[in-house]
Image (spheres, grey):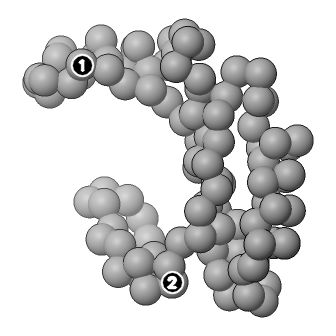
């Protein structure tokens, strides 16, 4: 089974209040040197069978019509390598 990832982010010209709140909080929490924070969404889709151009076109259509609000958001679609997904280190404090 393949994994297709859709990342959705606000367009650069759209204000991001949640990202701004995180950016303002970081120095108070002792994290310096972060000049900007943008908040987004990540969708991981498990696809049955091989991922070809037809499957990717269908996922792009899904992203454009359902997963992203294309008036204010951009999205990217990519296939995640199974070996890459299996070797990703788990973040400390995150349940498996």
Residue hosting label 2? 82
Name the element at disc 2. helix
Query: At which x and y percent is residue 12?
Result: 52, 19
Q: Is residue 50 above or below residue 53?
A: below
79 vs 69, left or right, is: left
In the picture, the quarter occupied by the C terminus is bottom left
68 vs 94, nearest the viewer: 68
Q: Is residue 16 above or below residue 65?
A: above
Query: At which x and y percent is residue 9?
Result: 58, 34
Residue 29 appears in the figure: no
69 vs 22, nearest the viewer: 69
Name the element at disc 1. loop
Residue hosting label 1? 35
Residue 27, picture quadrant:
top left
Residue 35 appears in the figure: yes
Packing grade of label 2 (10 A; few <14, some 14-19, many >=20) is few
Q: Residue furthest front?
A: 53
Residue drawn 33% across and 68% down? 90
> Of marks 1 and 2, which one's residue comes earlier in the chain?
1
Residue drawn 53% across and 72% down? 80
């Amino acid at each position: 089974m393949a994994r297709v990832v859709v990342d959705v982010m606000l367009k650069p010209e759209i204000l991001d209040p949640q990202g701004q709140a995180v950016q303002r909080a970081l120095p108070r929490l002792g994290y310096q040197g972060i000049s900007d924070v943008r908040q987004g969404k990540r969708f991981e889709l498990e696809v049955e069978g091989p991922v070809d151009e037809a499957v990717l076109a269908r996922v792009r259509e899904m992203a454009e019509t359902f997963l992203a609000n294309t008036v204010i958001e951009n999205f990217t679609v990519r296939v995640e390598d199974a070996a890459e997904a299996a070797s990703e280190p788990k973040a400390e404090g995150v349940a498996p």
